[in-house]
Image (cartoon, helix red, strand yellow):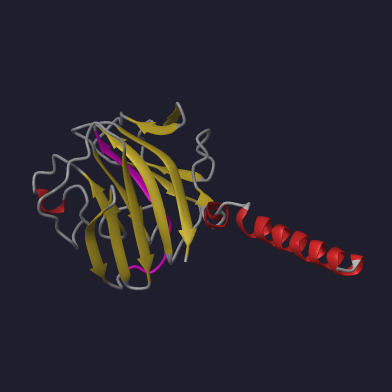
Amino acid sequence: MAATSRRAIRVALALSVLGFVANYAVPEATSQDADWITLFDGKSLDGWDQVGESNWRVEDGAIVADKMPGKEAGYLVSKNSYKNFIVRVEFSPSDNANSGIYFRCLDPKKITDRTCYEANIFDQRPDPSYGTGAITRYVEIDPMPKAGGKWNTFEITAKGRDITVVLNGQTTAKLRNGMFDEGPIALQHGAGAIKFRKVEIKPL
């Protein structure tokens, strides 16, 4: 075989190897993770506005609240508004916690389950139909899962009129509704103690 032909074959093989490395050396998760926006960096509450008087603070990389002076719930409200998205939040409530993830809120200074959608966190809710895993006022849950005393993950998808709530990998609520179409995300402290970490959102 001529030297020129051998060199051509070696060059072709080298290019093939380089192409393989380029395609597979970088994990696929890198491109996927790049789509997510971190709303809480584990260090500060920058990027959030406080509504109410709960004692929000950062401890050991988590947002924590466990006290409020009166009966009014406290909220951390994102400075930005979101329309179509997946929001993912890890949370750890006390057994008696009343909390939730609010989204598409109409007014960032007035957070309620009548002006936002709420994925509820409330194991001891007197009416458990809208307890943990439900969308308050819209989608009931039976049986209600318990989240108290451990870390859990909410993944909430809102795309157009379709909303899905997934708790610890299990779908707990699905809703088709056009009441609210855009607004900030809010974290609630209404009773007991609540911790949040790894708060991130992926616009759709």
Coordinates of residue 28 in the picture (x, y in percent): 54, 55
In this rendering, position of residue 42 left or right of residue 22 = left
Coordinates of residue 84 in the picture (x, y in percent): 43, 66
Whether residue 16 is visible here, answered yes or no, is yes
Of 26 and 177, the residue lying toward us:
26
Name the residue located 27 percent from the left edge and 72 percent from the top edge: 177
Choose top left, top right, bottom left or bottom right for residue 55.
top left
Q: Which residues fall within the magenta stretch?
A: 180-191
In this rendering, position of residue 140 left or right of residue 152 = left
Coordinates of residue 152 in the picture (x, y in percent): 30, 41
The quadrant of the picture occupied by the N terminus is bottom right
Name the residue located 43 percent from the left edge and 56 percent from the top edge: 184
Name the residue located 24 percent from the left edge and 64 percent from the top edge: 174
Choose top left, top right, bottom left or bottom right for residue 9.
bottom right
Of 166 and 124, the residue lying toward us:
166
Question: What residue occupies the far front of the structure in this picture?
Answer: 1
Of 59 and 108, the residue lying toward us:
59
Question: What residue occupies the far top of the structure in this picture?
Answer: 60
Q: Is residue 64 above or below residue 178?
A: above
Name the residue located 35 percent from the left edge and 32 percent from the top edge: 65
Choose top left, top right, bottom left or bottom right for residue 176.
bottom left
Whether residue 56 is visible here, answered yes or no, is no
Of 28 and 11, the residue lying toward us:
11
Whether 183 is among the magenta residues is yes
In this rendering, position of residue 170 left or right of residue 182 = left
